[in-house]
């Protein structure tokens, strides 16, 4: 956990008009409650299993990571989905699978860099 920093109020910078929020804003407390409630919903993993076609020789660690990330995207972007038939396959691929594969590729590249610099 981080440490609590206590500052005397007169040492804080003055708030001016340029710091005010204009347009849309997100209540972080409300958003975190939504995310927490989505963690309790377990059927997204089954939906991802139905939508993904995993090649036989796939790396298990990659498959697990991809399924979890896809499930997270699915929960956030399509919370009303209750079965694989509730989402268009192209929407799943564009908004869940493609970003997940990009993120997983970054993780793999970073792991390779780390392993070459710090071999076991």
Image (spheres, helix red, strand yellow):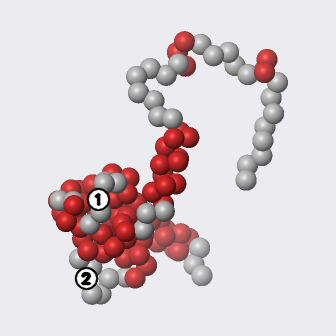
Which is more toward the observer, 10 or 42? 42
Judging by the rendered image, the residue that carries numbered circle 2 is 55
Q: Quadrant of residue 23?
A: top left
Q: Is residue 19 above or below residue 34?
A: above
Give the residue drawn at x 53%, y 69%.
114
Q: Residue furthest top?
A: 17
**x, y percent for residue 98:** 27, 60
Disc 2 crowd rating (10 Å Cα; few below 14, some 14-19, many 20+) is few
Find the distance from the CA under tag 2 to the CA under tag 1.
25 Å
Please, is residue 116 above or below residue 12 in the view? Answer: below
| Number of dots carrying numbers | 2
**Side of 16 relative to 74 (left or right):** right
Q: Residue at x 33, y 51 (%)?
A: 77
Q: Earlier in the sequence, mark 2 or mark 1?
A: 2
115 or 7: nearer the viewer: 7
Q: Which residue is mark 1?
A: 81
**Residue 62's x, y, as percent?**
39, 75
Does the image show residue 67? no
Label 1 residue SS: loop
Disc 2 on helix, strand or loop? Answer: loop
Res. 19 image quadrant? top right
Give coordinates of residue 108: x percent, y percent.
42, 69
Quadrant including the C terminus: bottom right
Instruction: Work out whether residue 22 can be spotted.
Output: yes
Q: Is residue 60 left or right of residue 27?
A: left
- Where is residue 109? Give x, y as percent: 42, 67
């Amino acid at each position: 956990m981080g440490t609590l920093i206590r500052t005397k109020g007169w040492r804080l910078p003055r708030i001016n008009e340029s710091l005010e929020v204009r347009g849309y804003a997100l209540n972080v407390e409300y958003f975190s409650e939504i995310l927490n409630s989505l963690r309790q919903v377990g059927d997204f993993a089954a939906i991802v299993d139905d939508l993904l076609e995993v090649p036989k020789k796939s790396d298990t660690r990659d498959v697990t990571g991809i399924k979890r990330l896809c499930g997270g995207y699915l929960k956030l972007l399509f919370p009303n989905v209750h079965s694989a038939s509730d989402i268009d396959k192209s929407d799943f691929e564009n908004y869940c699978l493609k970003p997940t594969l990009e993120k997983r590729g970054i993780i793999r590249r970073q792991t390779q860099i780390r392993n070459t610099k710090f071999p076991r």
